[in-house]
Amino acid sequence: MHLKHFISTAALALVLCFSANAQTDTTSSGSHTVTRDRMNKGLVTGGLDALNGQSAGVVITSGANRAAMLDAVRVRGTTSLTGGNDPLVIIDGVASDISTLGTLYPGDIESFTVLKDASETSRYGSRGASGVIKVDTRKGKGGAFSLSYDGISGIESVCKNLDMLDAEGFRAYNRANGYSIIDKGANSYMPGSILRTGTVENHHISFGGGTDESRYRASFGLTDHKTVVKTNRYRTYTAKLDINQGAFDGLLDFDLGVFGSLKKSSDLHDIQHLFYSSAAFNPTFPIGAEADGSYSQIPEASQINNPSSLLEKQFDSDNAHFNAHLQASIHLLKNLELSAFGSYSYNVTEDAHFFPTIVWSHGEAYRGHTRSQDFLGDINLKYTFEAGPHHLELTGLTEALQTVSDGSFATTTGFTTNIFGYDAIQAGALRPWDGTASFFEDVGLLSFMGGANYSYSEKYLLALSIRSDASSKFGPNNRWGYFPSASFTWAAIKEPFLRDLGWLSNLKFTVGYGLSGNQGALGAYNSMSLLRPTGIVNMNGTPTTSFGIVRNANPDLKWEVRSSGNVGLESGFIDNRLVFTAEVYSSLTRDMLYEYEVSVPPFAYNRLMANLGKMSNAGAEFGLGGTPLHNKDMELNINVNLSFQHNKLISLSGWYKGEYLTAPDIAGLNALNGAGFHGGHNDIVHQIVGQPLGVFFLPHCTGLAQAEDGSWYYEMADGEDNRIAGQATPKATLGSNISFRWKDFDISLQMNGAFGHKIFNGTALTYMNLESLPYYNVFSSAPAKGIKDQTVTDYWLEKGDYLNFDYLTVGWNVPIRSSVIHNFRISASVNNLATITGYSGLTPMINSSVVNSTFGLDDKVSFPVYRSYTLGLNIQF
Amino acid sequence: MIIVLATCCSVLEEDARDQKPADEIITDANALYLTTLGNLYSQFGADSDGEGLMGTYRGIYDLNTFTTDEAIIPTRGGDWYDGGLWQRLFLHTWETGEAPLKNAWNYLYKVIVSANQALETLASNRNLVPDDDYSSWNAEIRAIRAMYYYYLVDLFGRVPLVTSTSTAMADVAQSKRSEVFTFVKSELEAVVPLLYEGRSNIKGKYYGRITKPVVYFLLAKLCLNAEVYTDDDWTDNLRPECGDYLRETISWCDSLYGLYHLETDYSSNFSVFNENSVENILTIPMDKQEYSSQFQYIFRSLHYDHAAACGMSGENGASATLEALEANGFGTPDQDPRFDLNYWGGTALNLDGAPIVMSSGEPLAYRPLSVALDVSGAVDEKFAGARMRKYAIDPNGMKDGKLVGNDIVLFRYADVILMKAEAMIRLGQDGTSLINEVRDRAGAEPYEKASLDNILKERMIEFAWEGLRRQDLVRFGAFTRAWSSRPALEGEANGYTTVFPIPADVLSVNPKLTQNPEY
């Protein structure tokens, strides 16, 4: 259909046909709301910490340094290969992202709602294809002025680290084996040389007030987190203001919010290199610089550096985020409401790094900035109709989103001095051609949606919706996708025959089905054949920039479609003292967007972004909450959620321009790194058709065997191929919270667990290999074991099951009876209390959800395990 | 509503600003050059694995070098095991999934498909250039494409001939090795009259480009190797009679006579400023300011301390084999003068010629004779093997010494002389004066009589580490013989390893392609 024609008909449809607001949670069971009192209470420095473990089916993977950075959030697992697996974050109606949520101060959050089913996410269309985390922040309440302060202060200290051979053992082994080493006479525990006691500070002040018609709330927060690794620090400053104004006796409502944040990060560059260096560096070297400020290095250990010297690298970024939104609602008629919403987000990241000449030949300085600007507008029309037991709600919605991203960077090298850092990058003599660039990207989404919610006596609830979405990323003929959804809920508890059962307080069944489109991580311009600068060549004797096509264009790109169905149960017993929920779901992703491997020739490049394969996901989620004890003095709450998830990569084949394309059935997703690990046969986690995404595909080791020289090696069955040996993603995840209150004291324990997956312990494979000596240190247990081999086999593939005690918090609500102070609470927390696991590495809590280079692979990148001890204070006036 | 609709229409149009459609870029002859020939030449050199004709790792050069009796990357304890890759290459036990195979295939075809695209772009913009330029550019693009097919026929034997961007997947099927050879040869012959006749290795308009002499050289190579390339069944130990091709080799070599000369100083061909060499025929232009192509082989070879003393980094890897030492008469009174120009075989010296002292306090000295497939645990684990000295170290090199000024030599005139000598010997003529011309320049004793044996040996010495060895060994039927650290591979004698397997992933994405014999 011609675009313009379509728009006018769609607009007409919008005007004529109003429909339902599927946002209404009445028909959903998959959605899960976490309110303030349920949010995590331990050390939470960002919005996501507050949610971790609280909602079934939601997996939050923190970055390698755990608390400080956030890698990813998965709602019901990975459903797309190309990306776009991050759930949509909606903060007060404004589309946002996970990193912004990470900076939002938990104290500003009123509630989280996690939407998982197709009919629940239909309001958000393709952007919500991987689930939606809806965050409502606290707004001013009418009435008296109120002021509150929240603060946390604490320290972090390492409680578990790698056990490397100490200087004595290092000398002894090398002497015994005739290796000559450089012995500087020190006895250094190198893994500790880059560590310190970390600190964490959060302070947050908010105030609000107003009248019934006019309310406001303002808050300001700051966090400062120095992690346990030297130089690694994150500071966040946030400010937030919300104003609501009603007018004309409630006919008109304005809602204005602004949010600004600045996150200053001093990151660690190449943490694998840093941790590899700190583990394997010669322990007879003193820690730190020589008297003249230089660092002794071991040139033979070319894959590592003196760990202290690596801390001289500067790797900083400032991320500033600003967002403003305005919503206006008009009650046109008694039951007809029109609302318009507009928002603008501006996000800019300034990156700067400097690698001094002591660790980087000729040094390198870099400055760059990337920014993205989002413009979102929507118009929403809602009509409600009520007659006796019938209740009908119709909504119509149109929405447009435009995102413009651009940026630039410059790199220089050829430094003779390190004193300028990245503040005078012209101190470097050379500007490599590929070290300077700028870029621009511009994508848009346009949507129309109509929906109807009908309920009869609050007993039967039906929700229907259809949306049409268009994305600029697709070819002109494939831009539009149509995604209907439906769900039906039977509130059995409202039936006369159940209503009067004393012990049953809630019973609801829901069934739903829907389609959703995903275009997620697809970049701009994939559908177009475009030229860009490719390099420098000689033209008429002068170096000149050449232009070329650098990827296969696919003009037929279209929506990836996921169909999903769900059946759920919600029940409550004895006045909801015991609550049980269960839901099973199943989804199928087809026309899966992915950079498929294609035949060269006829293609110029061996990757083509196309819609070919299929993947399925299925799972079950259970929630059990109980309040076995509840009286004036005592209260005990126990909440457990348990999710099972199964994923299968069904196919990587399909049709493209009339030809059947097939990508290889087996492809490596990540590989080991380090000395002697570059090149073949080091792939660990694979993507295999017919298997869950991310399985271990390794040669089988039959055990250790002794070589002629007495050393041991990993013996492999002769002539046997690699075998599939488990999956990287947990089959089950668990979140549990137990809280107990006695009078004004309370205690709360949070546990999270994951089960049924495996981890490849590449760290042990590396550090058990005595062949690394004398230049790279090994585990203290390595000499006794005598292994001289680092062949990749399933020997170091271990079970990843764990149960982690995330935090324990003890609080006291000090009973101050004062007209000024309404609430006064002090608390103490320990985070990362203990882990129960059979995994032999540092921690089983590695990346087990995101398909990337660390997926299921523990390869010298894990932060040492540390605990946080914090004190908190909360005062409300 | 009107505003909304207006927004909607623009929202769905992607405004590409950092990349543009061809018709917006190509508005004059310069832009046409840069999007066609320029874009192809920008891919001759590279800075990442598997890309480029020479200079980088895990691509064409490694397949032609570390599979031979010329060079080896020994496993050194924790270093250089790399999943057994280097050992498998050396032992000829490579697998079809080996990364360098796929890298080489994808790289060569990427440039070929880009050349097809360039021909079509040129044709559709023919109005932008004078007729003469049009035909010479067209010829030059076809010559590039033929050269890339030459690398393919050499490495993989039976490969698909694709000459248009509109070729459907269903039509991508392998041609016989001899058909690919014929295609390359006829293309080169067809275009050669239209090319610029001057030299390509000197700075100026044709710097780094394919000119007539480059094509003469390629035709000579092609004809000399004809008995290999026209042999459609290379596992039967029989080769076609190729006397005519040998006579042709001589005549192509003769076309270069007088245009090029042997440099008096062998090393000057590989110096930091080697653009003035009268011997180099085709080079990849290098300049740390102007180009981004890298030369990573010195970095890969030198000991850490050696490289560090020269202002670069080193990976302490690639070494000369015992066969290379023997050919050079290493350690004997008759040691070839080129040994010390091509290799570091003893005390390592810094740029000022002073010995390098290691952090342990001892002077750094290589131990060429300790080289083996796996030297792990040996006393001289880190010192075993003579290292690469060919190509002067650029004292101002950047990026660990990989971004340097020395142009990378792909073809040079000494090869022309030895090709001609070899063809003459194969035709029963006397090539002694030619081989001795090359030896004489290096200061080596002349041979009494040139033979195929001493030609092969001379080529090992003269062209050490220039990426030619595999082709030479195959042509001489010597690729499958055993050598030190490399026992004869069972079943290899029939010659199946002289052609690499079609990479596993290439077969899996195009089921019409079939694997080469015995893989």
Image (cartoon, coloured by chain):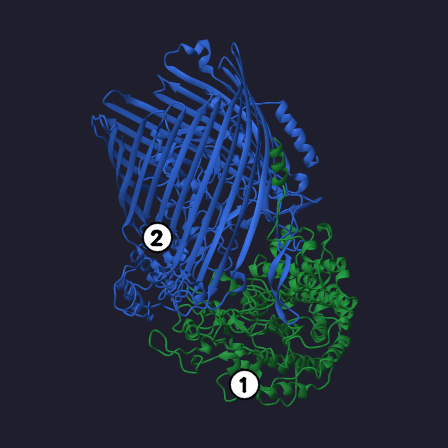
With B407 as the anchor, is B191 left or right in this view? right
Residue type at mark 2? Asn
Label 1 SS: loop
Tell which subunit mark 1 falls on.
B
Q: Residue at x 28, y 59 (%)?
A: A189
Q: Quadrant of residue B135?
A: bottom right
Q: Chain B appears what colour? A: green
Chain assignment, label 2 = A
Q: Image quadrant for the N terminus of chain A?
A: top right
Which of the numbered marks, if any, corresponds to residue A232? 2
Which of the two marks, 1 or 2, is nearer to us in this view?
Answer: 2
Residue A285 point in image, percent of width and height: 29, 66
Residue situated furthest front in the rendering: A248
Q: Nearer the viewer, residue A52 or B86?
A: A52
Badge 2 marks a residue whose secondary structure is: loop
The colour assigned to chain A within the rendered structure = blue
Residue A593 seen from this side: yes
Q: Is residue A281 above or below residue B215?
A: above
